[in-house]
Amino acid sequence: MERGFCVIKLIAADMDGTLLNRDRIIDSRTAAAIMAAQENGVRFVIATGRIFSDVRDFLTPYGLRCEYLTMNGAEYYDDEGICRLGIYIPKPIAKEVYAVLLRHPKFTVEFYTDRGHFSADSRRKTLKGMLRRFAARQKTVLPGFRSLWNAAHDGHFRRMQYIEDMEAFWESGIQLAKFITFGDTPSEMALLREELASIPGIAVTSSFVTNIEINDQRATKGAALAAYIKELGILPSEVMVLGDGDNDLSMFRAFPENSVAMGNAIPELKEIASAVTEDNNHAGVAQAIEKMLAGQ
């Protein structure tokens, strides 16, 4: 860490690569630091690209009660797990996005909605997408059988709903919050970004170098968090944000005074951060919170 902080009333932290370590768990030091902050009256928000049902799975073992900005800011949940805000992609724009994604049949595509997550791909192709996701999160090529078993038994995969009729899906009342797709190389993702650039009204981000996430342009972590704290009467200078990836840039730009990049963060995030902490495998979030508490 490079500097102290003013009085902090709210902490917002990314999940993958930030709260979670390489074993996809919150270490005990970090869980204790979050609880200590809450005991000192600091609100704790998990700001993630994940859908709410996936986040809940991870927090259950720790007994943590948090607030949530999910799907990159598309939905806000209070600490009771009730959705208080939703920002969704208009159907005409969503259809344009999907038409672009269909030009890349190799990619797996998931639809994150207000009624869970869906895929129009086969179960086999969706499972391949889960393997890509695991490899990207752990920054490694996972061993075949073990990774296949883990993917097939992952809660996200088991809860996947499959779309048999796309027209019926578009005509339904389901609200689409986010598209997410995984490829194999950064160059593939860069090409897809270029194609999506012509579609107005969307925000294109990523959690890893081999994925793309597409939301309504109003549904970014930074914009959603800024709107939320305004309702609470909290100043931007009273917010601390932590993250590691491209989809955290909007938070760091919205809250530059107390923005903490993980040691494993992308260079762009470190460049604009007010401080850099340890990486996610060495309790970087805990270190930042402990220093903040000691300072105030």
Image (cartoon, helix red, strand yellow):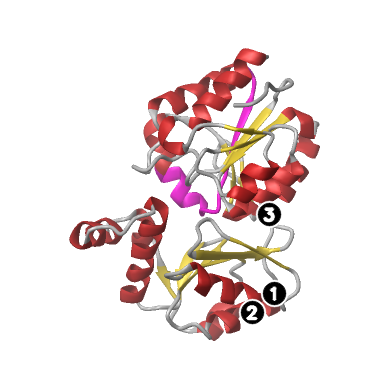
Which callout, 2 or 3, points to the residue nearer the camera? 2
| 126 up-or-down from 280: above or below | below
Judged left or right of residue 141, residue 293 is right
- Residue 240, x across and y down, in percent: 67, 32
Circle number at residue 195 = 2
Residue ID for mark 1: 197
| 227 up-or-down from 142: above or below | above
Circle number at residue 220 = 3
Where is the C terminus found, in terms of image quarters?
top right
Residue at the image position 56 percent from the left and 59 percent from the top: 206
Which callout, 3 or 1, points to the residue nearer the camera? 1
Q: Are marks 1 and 2 in contact (CB under 8 Å)?
A: yes
Place residue 139 in its image quadrant.
bottom left
Rounded to the nearest angstrom, the CA distance separating label 1 from label 2 is 5 Å
- Residue 228, x across and y down, in percent: 74, 41
- State the extent of the magenta-drawn residues as a range: 40-57
The amino acid at mark 1 is Ala
